[in-house]
Structure formats: structure tokens, C-alpha cells
Image (cartoon, rainbow, N blue to C red):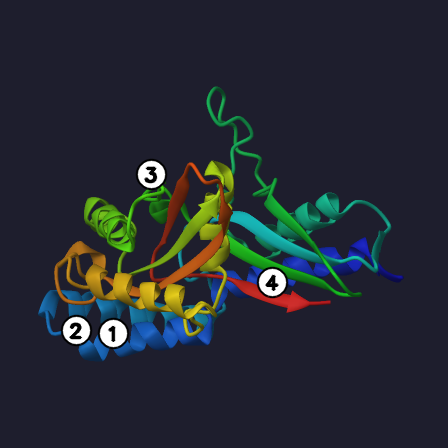
Amino acid sequence: MREIDCDVITKTVKDLFIKANIILPADTENAVFAACEKESCAVSAAALRTAKENLIIAKEENMPICQDTGMAVVFCEIGNEVHITGGSLTDAINEGVRKAYSEGYFRCSVVDDPLFNRKNTNDNTPAVIHVEFTHGINLKLTVEPKGFGSENMSRIKMFNPSITKDDIIKFAVQTIKDAGGNPCPPVVIGIGIGGTFDYSAVLAKKALARSISVRNPNPLYASLEEEILTELNKTGVGAQGFGGYISALAVNIEYFPTHIAGLPVAINVNCHIARHAEITI
């Protein structure tokens, strides 16, 4: 049995959220830079150059990439030989979020009651926490600061199990067309296929935490990722919705077994700032 103290978890979560809000993963940053060179539509190319400049300034000046520093999402993979000491895992994570958003001077965007008083919690807690139990003595933490300009454009659909992959492609294309410039394209989208209504959405969120340079290990789903990306870039939405040929940077798919009577599909939309960071303790 390996013991991990809550103070270690708190510090780790804090550091990860500060990093994720300031420095974009290298593969996503490179995709934005490459898009600047590929886009032939003048207005969209100018928008992409501005996005590139923004990424550079944020890193150099140690400032948030975007003013919407997101709602805190955390994925925890806990080995069965790990024992958390000094408190609860949930409290340790929330304390890390609290410290990150205070010390990083990040905007706090979480309200305590979603419908009625909508009072800001003023520390960006509570985080949305997903826990998975694995084998071993390690704790893997993956953080996603999820902005809501793109989150609001996400969709979920309970398909008939007789559908084909083309129906899923059409669903993804229509989602991005309907979103237009709202999610600050070019987008990165995570797609969750299978499971239940709720779990397909978790899969879609988890897909956004995967490097955009890594394809699904199943060749059928890897091929579908590429097919959907190709079709999204035919929509004409373009950077910031100005038109052009680069509307999406990447498509990541995660899948899970499902019931014989259904086929849930969730599409979690992210802007070009697909922020995430991870570490294994």
C-alpha cells in the first residue's frame, strides 16, 4: 500500500491548473501555428495570426490564454494500492482549484446554485471530478479548465442502434454549423460514443483531455476521427466564424460498450484553446 498525502494532491492540482490556463499543449499550439500558414481565406488567416500571437504573449507574460479560465474538471485514476491520507480526495482537489484560481489571478466563474440565486462561489469551486479505479500504486491527475463559450455549443443525441457512421458524421457537422463562430473556432471536439446518456458525455469530455496528436488505438475509430475532421473543414465556418477552410483542428473519440437498444453519442465542443494538463504521482 502506498500513501499519498492530501497536501501533495492539493499542490499538484494547483500547479496543473495554473499551467493549463497559461500554456497550451505543444501539439495544439503547433496546430494553431500550422493553420496560420494553411488558411487561404484572408480574414480567417488574420484571425488565426491573432490567436497565435495571443498564445505567445500568454506564455511569455505568464498570463491566462483566455479570459474565461473555465470550470474546473478533474479526472482521477487511482491505483488500488493507493491510500489517500490527511483528508478526502474531493476536498484536496477543491483546495488545489481554490489556490490555483487565487494565486493565478484567474477569473472565477462558478455559481453555487445553477437556477435560482446564481451566486458566485468566488474561488471557482467546486470542481467536477471523475474518478476511475485502476491497478497499481499511482495516482494520475488530468485537469481541464473548460470554458463555456464552447461548452454551450455541445450536443448529445440518443441514436437508434441501426444508424451508420455517416449519421454520426452528419451529427458532428450539423453541431459545428449550428455553433458557427460562438465556440471560437477552429475547434477541437471530443466525441463520446456508447455507454449511457450520462456516460457518453463523460467520454466526450475525456476525449478532450487526450493529446490531439494521438489517434484512437482502435483503427476503426481512428479512421472515423479523421473522416469527421475532414468533413468539419468543409463546413466553411472558418476561424472565429469568418469563413475559410480550417474550421477544426482535431477530433478525438472515446467509446464504451452500450445497450442493445441504443447508441448514445455526445459531442463536447472546445475552442482552439483545448486546455489540459496531467501528471502521475
Q: Amino acid at mark 1?
A: Ala
Label 3, residues with CA under 10 Å away: few <14, some 14-19, many ≥20: few
In the picture as drawn, the residue positioned furthest to the top comes out as 116
Q: Report helix, strand or loop for mark 2.
A: loop
- Disc nearest the viewer among 1 and 3: 3
Q: Position of residue 188 (x, y in %)?
A: 35, 60
Q: Earlier in the sequence, mark 1 or mark 3?
A: 1
Residue at horizontal 72%, vertical 55%?
10
Residue carrying label 2: 39
Q: Position of residue 243 (x, y in %)?
A: 12, 60
Separation of marks 2 and 4 at Cα, in angstroms: 32 Å
Residue carrying label 1: 35
Q: Quadrant of residue 66?
A: bottom left
All told, the count of numbered labels is 4
Give yes or no for contact between labels 4 and 1 (Cβ–Cβ under 8 Å): no
Answer above or below: position of 39 versus 168. below
Q: Nearer the viewer, residue 205 or 275?
A: 205
Give yes or no for contact between labels 2 and 1 (Cβ–Cβ under 8 Å): yes
Separation of marks 3 and 4 at Cα, in angstroms: 40 Å
Q: Position of residue 55 (x, y in %)?
A: 38, 70
Residue 160's label in the rendered image is: 3
Q: Nearer the viewer, residue 215 or 114?
A: 215
Q: Position of residue 183 (x, y in %)?
A: 30, 51
Q: Earlier in the sequence, mark 3 or mark 4?
A: 4
Residue 16's label in the rendered image is: 4
Q: Amino acid at mark 2?
A: Glu
* Residue 57 in sight: no
Q: Is residue 106 left or right of residue 224?
A: right
